[in-house]
């Protein structure tokens, strides 16, 4: 893995021509919000956040903005996936207009991926585009959703089906705020960290196997894992901003994950996004194994690590009913990655050796899901 | 003015790098819809249109698509400005998902500017962007809204405040369909044609003064006026796609126009967009005259032509109350073109000599509006 200076502050650049920006990672970086907004020339800044994060982290951000002479207006939405809706998009847009956010001003998204996706999308469409600062407060948002410019909302037929590409002007990932995150949410975000190892960095996966307890404990290992994840994402996004090719690799585990989230109707008490991704990663490896692409031993090793940190790895780990294979196939067919009716799967030939496949017959996926649903999958400790 | 071959079909290119496209103008070009969609590689096409246009022109478009082996699904919205809303955006998006419009497929906007703006915006955000064909059926949409990629919806505080830049892949401007347009709507669209002369083409304005009756009658003069308007717009858009500079000239008359439309709450029985633009053009010339930038005689000449074709030119031409100068100033302050709290006005030094001004003291605009509201403005035939 790329080694970063073990300094407090790590800066990861995202190179996208005139849309380039920096990701600042470290304890206390949110205190820079005011100066950063001022440096970007904003007069008014709307801080979009959810009720939970507002109670914990809004005040210092408002204070930092006001100290820099910025008019700061908070816009507070309910926490949870169901906030990524047309109804809340309309409300946030109304709030931005009431705060007189003009071209040249800024939207600051302070929260997890839900707030980042919703506020980022509102910024993308307000006056046909104003700038945004992403200030991710969940691990998942710090290592994934705040970087790369994908924004959007859900519809009743699928996740993230409505949205825009809208790169932020700056990402402020304050590692201090992760201390208030619930262990369940931290773990869920960790699934996306593991994903980067599985996509194309065997060494990083092995480093995580050895060091995950330090990553969970906080401190330098955690900052390092976040920075490494951001650097991986930045590198893929720089090569393929609009997902015409390689960027689809970032969806490893996500075709399954989105279908599972749909199957529980985005009910976060049953399944949060990162947990769905953990199951999706396990399914991607087992599906690849069932196709003879990767050894069962390597698939088991991935499942082993996910289970070691306490993440779910089987559909049956989800409490309650999720429906049958036909239902899940239908949900997968609504995936954005569908092209000319064909499903795209990200498959693996090994840990760190993922690839994009568009020629898997749907029947294979269906049989695989039927088998997964039929019986608990044998695994190392069964 | 640039002279086009008086052929039946005129093709105006819009040069925007890998977002370049053609505007095909002429009688019967809608019959090409099916072949065009096929050439663009679409399997499914959703035709978004309004009830009025559906009754008149939907059938042949569906037939053309089906003849080309395309799955075509109609999505029909109510006519009128109030359709450019979040509620209808959500409905159109749901319709596009139900029609399984995937990346690679197409949205075809068949209608006036309302349908074009709404369907174009839905295409921009569906799956973070699918392609669109604009098939404008009103004169206003053929000469203005279908070209240049601005899409969007209105909010209670102002017009077009939510939207995207999303260039179409093709524009099919069928001049035959204009025959079913009401005289009032044709006249309203003509205000935007006049606008191109006023912005930077004195000769075109003079040509319109001489030939407007032929333009209204149809045939070659009409196609020519449409093509010339599209070429003007294409040229400005190619130079400044995202309106960081010159493109703002296309808003000549529009800061006033949008405020007036807001003042009547977008009630099309009182004022349609093109009529608001006609009044806005007259106000821009009279405001410029009041600032000593242009002669009163030249302002009168513009007003004269607009009145000759039957367009309104004064605020008092709008039936009912529109409120006082403060109200209009407030409405103008919500304009997207506001930067750092300053209003942008497009002013004129003559016919065909418009320029962008950001340093007009608000007090001048307010006094001007007070004078306009106080008394019928003296004009050539009073
Ligand atoms: N745009 C992208 O590229 C991208 C990538 C991955 C995921 N996503 C999206 O991200 C979303 C999931 O993100 P998420 O897991 O951050 O969900 P989330 O935003 O719902 O946050 C999870 C929970 O943690 C709480 N929370 C956040 N920060 C906290 C903190 N510091 N202290 C205490 N509580 C805190 C939130 O209030 C929420 O209840 C999904 O909607 C997913 O689709 C987007
Ligand atoms: N995107 C842009 O760059 C841009 C530029 C200018 C205007 N606009 C927008 O365009 C809209 C106004 O466009 P419009 O004037 O076309 O309004 P519109 O779409 O409401 O059409 C006007 C009326 O004419 C009817 N109609 C359209 N074609 C017809 C036909 N061939 N036969 C019979 N009836 C027909 C419609 O049903 C409607 O009732 C406004 O919302 C304005 O903001 C956008």
Image (cartoon, coloured by chain):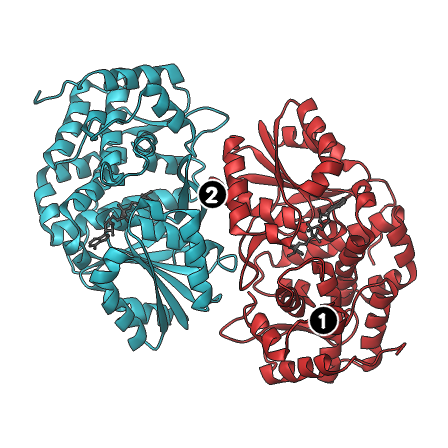
Chain colours: A red, B cyan
Pointer 1: what residue? A354
Q: Position of residue A148 (x, y in %)?
A: 64, 52
Quadrant for the N terminus of chain A in the image: bottom right
Mark identifier at residue B123:
none
The relative height of residue B166 versus residue A251 in the rendered view (above or below) is above
In what element is the residue under mark 2?
loop
Residue sitting nearer the eye, A177 or B224: A177
In terms of sequence position, does the residue under pointer 1 or pointer 2 come before the other? 2
Q: Position of residue B315 (x, y in %)?
A: 23, 26
Q: Nearer the viewer, residue B226 or B146?
A: B146
Identify the chain of the residue marked 1, using the numbered disc in the image: A
**Image-quadrant location for residue A110:** top right
Nearest the viewer among A30 and B29 is A30
Give the SS element for disc 1. Answer: strand
Give the x, y percent position of residue A125: 49, 45
Name the residue at 16% across, 28% down. B303
Quick check: B35 above or below B255?
below
Answer whether residue A98 is visible to the viewer in this image. yes
Q: In this view, does A281 lie to the left or right of B378?
A: right
Question: Ligand 1 within 8 A of label 1's CB?
Answer: no
- 10 Å crowding of disc 2: few (<14), some (14-19), many (20+): many
Q: At which x and y percent is residue A226? A: 79, 51
Q: In which quarter of the image is the C terminus of chain A?
A: bottom right
Q: Is residue A102 visible?
A: no
Which residue reaches farthest front?
A320
């Amino acid at each position: 893995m790329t080694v970063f200076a073990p300094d407090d502050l790590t800066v990861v650049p995202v190179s996208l021509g005139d849309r380039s920006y920096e990701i600042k990672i470290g304890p206390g970086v949110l205190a820079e919000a005011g100066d950063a907004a001022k440096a970007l020339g904003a007069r008014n800044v709307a801080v979009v956040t959810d009720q939970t994060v507002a109670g914990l982290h809004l005040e210092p951000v408002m204070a930092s903005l006001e100290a820099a002479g910025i008019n700061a207006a908070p816009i507070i939405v309910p926490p949870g996936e169901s906030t990524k809706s047309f109804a809340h998009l309309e409300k946030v847009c109304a709030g931005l207009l009431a705060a007189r956010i003009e071209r040249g001003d800024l939207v600051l998204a302070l929260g997890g991926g839900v707030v980042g996706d919703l506020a980022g999308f509102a910024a993308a469409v307000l006056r046909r585009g104003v700038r945004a600062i992403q200030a991710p407060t969940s691990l998942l948002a710090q290592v994934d959703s705040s970087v790369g410019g994908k924004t959007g909302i859900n519809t009743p037929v699928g996740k993230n089906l409505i949205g825009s590409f809208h790169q932020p002007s700056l990402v402020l990932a304050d590692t201090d705020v992760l201390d208030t995150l619930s262990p369940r949410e931290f773990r869920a975000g960790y699934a996306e960290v593991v994903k980067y190892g599985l996509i194309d960095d065997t060494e990083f996966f092995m480093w995580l196997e050895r060091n995950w307890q330090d990553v969970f404990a906080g401190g330098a290992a955690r900052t390092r894992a976040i920075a490494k994840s951001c650097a991986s994402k930045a590198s893929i996004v720089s090569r393929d901003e609009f997902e015409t090719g390689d960027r689809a690799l970032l969806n490893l585990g996500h075709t399954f994950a989105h279908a599972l989230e749909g199957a529980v109707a985005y009910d976060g008490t049953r399944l949060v996004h990162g947990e769905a991704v953990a199951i999706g990663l396990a399914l991607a490896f087992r599906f690849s194994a069932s196709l003879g692409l990767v050894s069962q031993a390597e698939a088991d090793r991935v499942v082993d690590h996910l289970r070691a940190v306490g993440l779910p790895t089987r559909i049956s780990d989800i409490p309650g009913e999720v429906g049958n294979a036909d239902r899940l196939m239908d949900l997968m067919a609504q995936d954005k990655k569908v092209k000319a009716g064909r499903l795209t799967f990200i498959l693996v030939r090994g840990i760190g050796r993922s690839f994009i496949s568009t020629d898997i017959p749907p029947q294979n996926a269906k049989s695989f899901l039927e088998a997964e649903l039929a019986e608990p999958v044998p695994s190392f400790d069964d």
